[in-house]
Amino acid sequence: MSKKTGRAEMILREQGARVTPQRVAILMAVAATGDHPDADSVYRHVSREYPHISRDTVYRTLSMMEEKKIIGSVLFGGASKRYDPNTRKHHHLICLRCRRINDFSAKKFDRLEVPSSAMERFTAVRTTVHVEGICDECQDRNRA
Ligand SMILES: [Zn+2]
Ligand SMILES: [Zn+2]
């Protein structure tokens, strides 16, 4: 058992989830791709190691992990839901071209207050800042 596998197992156990090799592999795949993967990318990654795992299992496991707050997620305009191994408070830089998502942290943004007038008919679940733009690589591609 590697150190990383051990950590994934520990996280699952702490959140009261049953530990199976597939779950460990799914959790590690979310972290390994390093770019807020969607469920399909996680499925492709895990199926290299577990060729018989079903897409459905991967999708259901990801939902379960999100519910238990083992992983987070990012949703934005028209794109499929992306999963996030980082469950600490943070914000996102989203590239409008390649849809790459990068994390950043900013104390100022952590304390953003939504005006109460906006909350009259709405219950806030979380407040995260999404900065949309063009990433470095896409800008370089433009120049080339
Ligand atoms: Zn980009
Ligand atoms: Zn993130």
Image: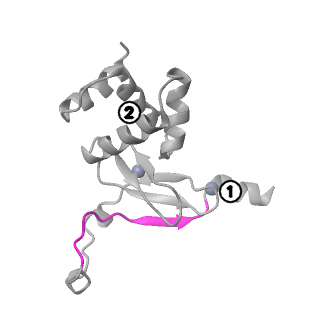
Please give the count of numbered marks on the rendered protein: 2
Cβ at disc 2 under 8 Å from ligand 2: no
* First reached walking from the N terminus: tag 1 or tag 2: 2
In the image, which is nearer the foreground, mark 1 or mark 2?
Answer: 2
- Residue range in magenta is 122-134
Q: Would you say residue 127 sits in the magenta stretch?
A: yes
Q: Looking at the rendered structure, which numbered label has been put on residue 27?
A: 2
Q: Give percent across and percent down for residue 106.
A: 35, 60
Mostly what secondary structure, the magenta segment?
A: loop
Marks 1 and 2, how far apart in space? 29 Å
Q: Would you say residue 63 sits in the magenta stretch?
A: no
Image point 24% across, 82% down: which residue? 115
Q: Is residue 71 shown above or below 89?
A: above
Looking at the image, residue 1 sits to the left or right of residue 117; the answer is right
Q: Looking at the rendered structure, which numbered label has been put on residue 138?
A: 1
SS for callout 1 = helix
User: Which residue type carries mark 1?
Assistant: Cys
User: Which residue type carries mark 2?
Assistant: Leu
Q: Is residue 65 shown above or below 5?
A: below
Q: Give percent across and percent down for residue 114.
A: 26, 77
Badge 1 crowding class, 10 Å Cα cut-off, few under 14, some 14 to 19, many 20 or more, is some
Q: Is residue 19 visible?
A: yes
Q: Quadrant of the N terminus?
A: top left
Q: Quadrant of the C terminus?
A: bottom right
Work out which residue is located at the far bottom of the displayed protein and give it.
117
Which image quadrant is residue 105 in? bottom left
Which image quadrant is residue 26 in? top left
Image point 22% across, 72% down: which residue? 123
Q: Give percent across and percent down for residue 3.
A: 35, 18
Q: Is residue 85 visible?
A: no
